[in-house]
Image (spheres, helix red, strand yellow):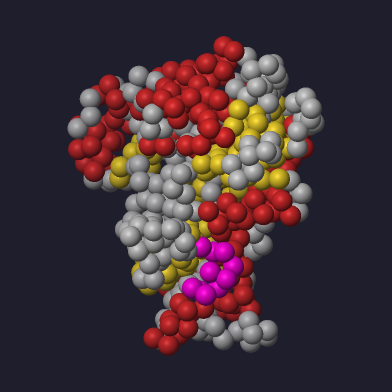
Amino acid sequence: MTQSIYSNYPPDLSPDQQKFLVTAVKDWAIQNGLAVRPSPAVVSSEANPNGVLATNAPVTLFPSPFPRACFDEAIALQEIYNKLYASITCNEEWLGVIVKGLIEVDDFVANLWKVHQAVQKEGYVQNLSLGLFRSDYMAHVSPTGAPALKQVEFNTISSSFGGLSARVRQMHTELLTSPPGSSINYPPHPLLQSEVPPENNAVETLSSGLAQAHKAYGVSKSTPALPLCVLFVVQDTERNVFDQHALSKQLSTVHNIAVFRISSVDILDQTSIPSSNSLRPLLYRPPHSPNSTFEVTTVYLRAYYSPDEYKSSRDWEARTHLERSAAIKCPTVLNQLSGCKKVQQVLAEPTGEDHLSSFLKDVEPTLVERVRSTFAPQYDLSVNSKGRELALNPETALNHVLKPQREGGGNNIYKSEIPGFLKSLPETDWKGWVLMELINPAPDAQNVALRSDGEVLRGDVISELGVYGTILWDDTGKILHNQEGGYLLRTKGKDVNEGGVAAGFSSLDSVLLF
């Protein structure tokens, strides 16, 4: 890797320069919706009893350098990754073998599988599935050779920050290019004077995927026919609302589609499926307009990806209610289960059956190998396995991360903590975890972050690239729509293990290619 790129980047800021940038970023963020609701840790509920406040999302003051070859490869492979996870979702038998190996050690996976089984027994009435995916990577640096693209994880549910990532790109670009012809917002640096972040069309791509599903649903299945809508299912205490609003606004203003938001806790109260209609349309009655009824074409889940969102049997009943309806789900329960870390580990196995080629049998073999090359080494923890040996040895554990079958930040166990953590669990529970070799980032990368509470931090950082894609397919595997588009860059302190922005670990960033 070109060390000179990182050795003097970003340029130092004088106190006045930092004050200017921080003020400019704070104001731009609020003016343009690059914002989040503040955490209770930042603003207490007593100080904000009506929930009216917003603050800037955590962002970097500078865009971060990222290898062009790795960025281009991630973009090039996204539609193949979309196809891969659609194919896995269609193969219920293969996915079921993996899931059944996790059921006895993971109640969350077990309950998701029960939802599928309950609906399958009754009979599915919708054969289309929608995926709004994000494949997350890092540029792996080895002692010899060019940086290589390595996948951190593949997200099949609530692939967030498409709306805000596009805003960050716009903000950094404006700072780099204004005033026209002679930017004075940043101190001089060759990279800042020669590059702007690449276009980020995440909002257009993700909303277009939802619009494709809405169109594919067809006409109303109710008699008399009802107006149609897309329904965003969100967390009851959602803070990342402005990211979601970027997509809903695009759907309503560009695609002319009615969009509503519903908290997951209100699903059973505000939606219904008429028992007299065998097609099982999902009907939504907005509480602010009780005399209006809409038929839901597409359910977009920005909730239900974490076990703590299922607080009682009523939450599982609501998830089953959505799954059995005629609405196109994003994702279905099976597609959510395909995002288990165990699936990623099985695909990456170097020996035994070549599952990757089986799922991509009609893809050019050279492209399949390019996908395979993005896999980092991963292992199960079965008795006498290499994974168990690496995880329990304090020296080799330092080069690994232990992952459960979860989405979102804050769930992984890192490095020296791995042996003790495993020994604290019954050995029968170990098969619910996957051991992954850590990816080595650029050693000298730095940036300056502005947190949501106004704190400014400068130091060594690690950046993680996410690439968005959308795909619409039926239960035979036929693909109706497949598109790559847009990216997310998250940057965190080098000593911070987790990477979630919403969980408070990372800052939103944009890319300078080199």
With 351 as the anchor, is 459 left or right in this view? Answer: left
Image location of residue 440, percent across then percent down: 40, 53
Residue 33 position (above or below residue 290)? below
Magenta residues, start to end: 25-35
Could you say which quadrant of the image residue 120 lies in? Answer: top right
With 7 as the anchor, is 283 left or right in this view? Answer: right
With 29 as the anchor, is 41 left or right in this view? Answer: left
Image location of residue 336, percent across then percent down: 52, 32
At x 44% / y 34%, what residue is drawn? 341
Is residue 89 something that shows in the picture? Answer: no
Could you say which quadrant of the image residue 185 lies in? Answer: bottom right
Is residue 199 something that shows in the picture? Answer: yes
Residue 412 position (above or below residue 129)? below
Residue 443 position (above or below residue 486)? below
Furthest-front residue in view? 291
At x 50% / y 34%, what residue is drawn? 339
In-front residue for pair 408/68: 408
Image location of residue 230, percent across then percent down: 67, 40
Image location of residue 335, percent across then percent down: 56, 30
In-front residue for pair 509/354: 509
In-front residue for pair 146/395: 395
At x 27% / y 21%, what residue is drawn? 428
At x 47% / y 79%, what residue is drawn? 23
Q: Main secondary structure of the magenta part?
A: helix
Quarter of the figure with the C terminus: bottom right
Magenta stretch: includes residue 31:
yes
